[in-house]
Amino acid sequence: MTVLTRDQADEAPAPPSGRVPVARRTSRLGRWWVPWAFLAPALVLFTYFKFIPMGQAFVMSFQDVQPYLGNSWVGWENYRALLETDEFLSAAGHTAIIAVAQTAGAVLVGFALALLLEGQARRLWFVRSAAFLPVVVPTAVIAELWRIIYHPTDDGLANSILGFFLIEPSQWINSPDTSLLSVILVGIWRDAPYDMIIIIAGLVGVDRSLYEASALDGAGWVRRIRYVTLPALRPAMAILLTLAAIRAMRIFTEVYLLTNGGPNGSSEVLMTLIYRLGFERVELGVAAAGSVVLLLATIVLTLLVRSGVRKEDS
Amino acid sequence: MSKNLDTALGLGAQNRWWLRATTVLVCVLVVLTFAGPLVAILVGAFDANRDPSRLSLVPTDVTLDNWRAALNRDVLHYLGNSLFVVGVGLLLQMGVSVLAAYALARKKFRGAGVVLVLILATMMLPEEILAIPLAVVLSDLPLLHLNLTDSLAGMIVPIVAWGFAILVMTEFMKEVPKELEEAARLDGAGELRVFWSVVLPTVTPALGVIGVFGFTMIWDQYLLPLLVASDAKTYTLPLALSSLRADPEVGIGVVLVASTLAMVPSILAFLGFQRSFMRGISAGAIKG
């Protein structure tokens, strides 16, 4: 999808004559190692902190990892141990629910916000900036904030709002029935403004004359959105939705700090489970197997999306 | 007519008073929903209130007691750790990014395609997926045999090379006209001079983009410091938040002070570099 074309070096006009042949030769070709020298820091760091750990994850996933005692090969045992546990299946299910619900919710709210806050007025610019703040605030702060909002007493903010609509107070993150929903609401609150900005950028590209034409045809705003705005936004929306879903698959910090997977594993996601396996139960081999599964799922989803987008393009 | 339909809903040009009132009301609601709770954190940090369920936009009893208590809980030390990590990390990250981008954007060389694929691949390998093996690697760096556990360096080195920053920078550097570079070379400028005095000064807006994104990315780090720090002396502010909350002797006020300290720098960075930020978002959305 990324179009990173090669340098258009050949398009530059050649110097008129051979007056400065030496300088010209080096500028055209340069010494072969020059680009590698510029790339070296990035490549070394990527090797150390991306590629070696990835290789390590694969190796460890086939080993019984025992610090100080030496590792032994166990074949597919770690993967079997992982896939046979109920907690893995339920964590995968919760992750999928979060990915779908949070992504869809954030795009819907983001779309509504974009329609309401689209425009040039200075007041709208201020409102958009204010709404965007949750996106830049550290996740850990967001989690502490929502722990206060979700305070389970009647006078907690979330329960006060429910009370305003005459709804019974909820236990939110403290009840297995609502913990997952609570995590999703926080995610929607945080992602919606981000989606709003991207959708507004897309709305700028909508042909204004189509709006006028639809108005002349007597179409109201509902039909205008349905037949003019939405079709124009489709490409941006497709990318937005899939990127968000892929990102949601590795959700960790919010869940770790809000519910830590609980109560009773009711909001356990893949990453909190992997963390628990690795650092609390010190089953590094099984945790590595979990990481590999998560990586494969991400790659498969990404490739599916890319081929889907390419098909749409052609 | 054309003015009426500048936007999909055509709200801007409505003159009926109740419609205008509704739009203002909607704006107020949106600001309250998204920015209100964050303002409440700030207000709560200066409020003597000890009720853990209360969030308010108006302080009832303004005080600095929370801040005094927070100082006693080493909050400044955690802030210092966070600032060190983000300062050194961002500087190195931007340096590595512009160097790599220069090679990718301005040089034609065998293997460039492979490098690009490798960089795209790293973007599918975030800290979350690599958490377990990354912790193992950081406790004993291959070849160097360094143990970075419980050091701020361990939180910095993994985020110095960042695919997103490199790719954004590469895109910007491609726009620099070839003629500028050629002219400098004819004047006898060497490779480093072309990089430093010709290409780099023309991409300063891009430095703003990768700078503000890098800052937000590093400042938001949670899992990586969690993997590296086992002792409270290496905690960053985000890590300290949950341990402060769990401490029964610490009131909600101290947690709100620490939250304010963690929140304000990122908000300032966003407000200061808003244009760069929005630019980067559209770039990132298109690129994936």
Image: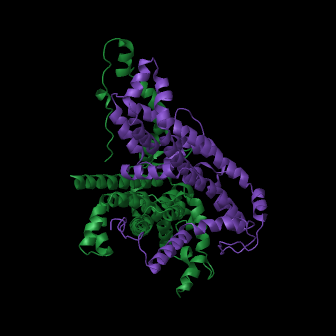
Chain colours: A green, B purple
Q: Quadrant of residue A84?
A: bottom left
Identify the residue at image location x=44%, y=22%: B184
Compared across the picture, whether A89 is left or right of A164 comes to left
Question: Which one is in front, A298 or B176?
Answer: B176
Task: Examine the rendering and report whether any part of residue B248 can be seen.
Answer: yes
Q: Quadrant of residue B32?
A: bottom right
**Residue at the farthest bottom position:** A166
The percent coordinates of residue A63 (x first, y second) are: 44, 48
Is the residue A36 above or below the residue A107 in the image? Answer: above
Front-lying residue, A120 or B184: A120
> Could you say which is closer to the camera, residue B185 or residue A177?
B185
Q: Can I make out residue A264 in this image?
A: no
Q: Residue A156 vs residue A180: left or right? A: right
Residue lying at the far left of the rendered structure:
A314
Q: Is residue A216 above or below residue B275?
A: below
Q: Position of residue A253 (x, y in %)?
A: 53, 59
> Residue B137: x percent and y percent?
52, 42
User: Residue A149 falls in which quadrant of the image?
Assistant: bottom right
A199 or A258, which lies in front?
A199
Total numbered labels placed on residues in the image: 0
Task: Report x, y in % for residue A56.
Answer: 45, 43
Residue A18 lies, with reference to residue A168, above or below; the image says above
User: Residue at 31% of width from left, 65% of height from top?
Assistant: A229
Relative to A253, is B87 above or below? Answer: above
